């Protein structure tokens, strides 16, 4: 079994403030360590379920947060950014048995995590087909394009509920709940235990039920925090400025949507 893990930090247990997510800030090291431990827990669960090969994309900020020395030896860690359209699931392909998300967070436009955002903090929100778009769904649709099942996610409670609404077969573990500018967190070690057992359960289950289907058409809407950004981005081929801070782009090809997001977000 070959498994892919995409890991972010804003949905990691305890992470509450932007300073805890930025590499040169004093608080960062503690939470990068917790990120590593939660990824390691996912690796343990995958190995318990029979995974022989595990690829991990360090998908937060610089892509240089996870300590590979603390992970099992059958892991490959993707650090940094190649510029690939697949972004937070760079190197994902049809050879993978399943995709897992660790440390993911609620999207821009929601109030479910103090650090809610989608791809870029200069953006108020991204919508796809009139629904708020999360980094989870953006990258899950890449998996759907490749016909790779999405079997597990850990992160904030709001995102876990969002994922369950999309597909109840995906196993989720909420390690914290966002309340205004605060978070309510379970114990860090309990978070690791729940992730390990949750991943094992997910991979031992009927993973085919976890496949998502792509919509037939994609209407992308992005609202920027600054009207000047919206005006500049509206010059992208096919994009339309529909309000002072809002643009739209439409396509039937999800790869075109990914390319648009790369340049517009």
Image (spheres, helix red, strand yellow):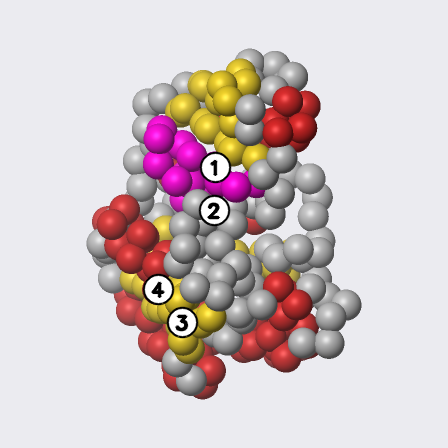
Residue tagged 2: 108
For marks 2 and 1 on the same chain, the one whose residue lies earlier in the sequence:
2
Label at residue 157: 4
Instruction: Please tell me whether residue 138 belongs to the stretch shown in magenta.
Output: yes
Q: Nearer the viewer, residue 120 or 242?
A: 242
Distance Cα–Cα, label 2 vs label 1: 7 Å
Residue tagged 1: 126
Residue 255's spot in the image, x, y percent? 51, 27
Tags 4 and 1 in contact by the CB under 8 Å rule? no
Q: Residue shown at 45%/27% (left/top)?
A: 220
Distance Cα–Cα, label 2 vs label 4: 15 Å
Tags 2 and 3 in contact by the CB under 8 Å rule? no
Element at label 2? loop
Q: Quadrant of residue 73?
A: bottom right
Tags 3 and 4 in contact by the CB under 8 Å rule? yes
Mark 2 or mark 3, whichever is nearer to me? 2
């Amino acid at each position: 079994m070959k498994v892919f893990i995409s890991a972010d930090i804003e949905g990691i247990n305890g992470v509450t403030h932007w300073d805890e997510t930025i590499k040169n800030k004093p608080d960062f090291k503690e939470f990068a360590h917790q990120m590593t431990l939660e990824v390691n827990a996912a690796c343990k669960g995958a190995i318990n379920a029979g995974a022989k090969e595990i690829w991990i994309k360090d998908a937060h900020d610089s892509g240089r947060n996870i300590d590979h020395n603390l992970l099992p030896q059958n892991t490959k860690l993707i650090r940094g950014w190649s510029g690939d359209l697949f972004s937070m699931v760079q190197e994902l392909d049809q050879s993978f048995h399943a995709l897992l998300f660790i440390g993911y967070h609620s999207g821009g436009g929601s109030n479910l995590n103090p650090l809610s955002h989608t791809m870029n903090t200069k953006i108020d929100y991204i919508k796809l087909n009139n629904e708020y778009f999360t980094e989870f769904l953006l990258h899950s649709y890449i998996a759907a394009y490749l016909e790779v099942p999405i079997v597990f996610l850990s992160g904030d409670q709001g995102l876990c509920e969002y994922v369950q609404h999309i597909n109840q077969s995906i196993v989720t573990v909420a390690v914290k709940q966002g309340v205004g500018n605060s978070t309510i967190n379970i114990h860090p070690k309990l978070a690791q235990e729940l992730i390990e057992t949750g991943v094992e359960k997910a991979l031992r289950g009927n993973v085919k039920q976890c496949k998502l289907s792509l919509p037939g058409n994609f209407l992308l809407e992005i609202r920027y925090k600054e009207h000047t950004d919206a005006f500049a981005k509206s010059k992208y081929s096919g994009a339309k400025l529909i309000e002072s801070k809002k643009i739209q782009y439409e396509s039937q090809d999800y790869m075109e949507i990914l390319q648009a997001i790369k340049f517009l977000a």
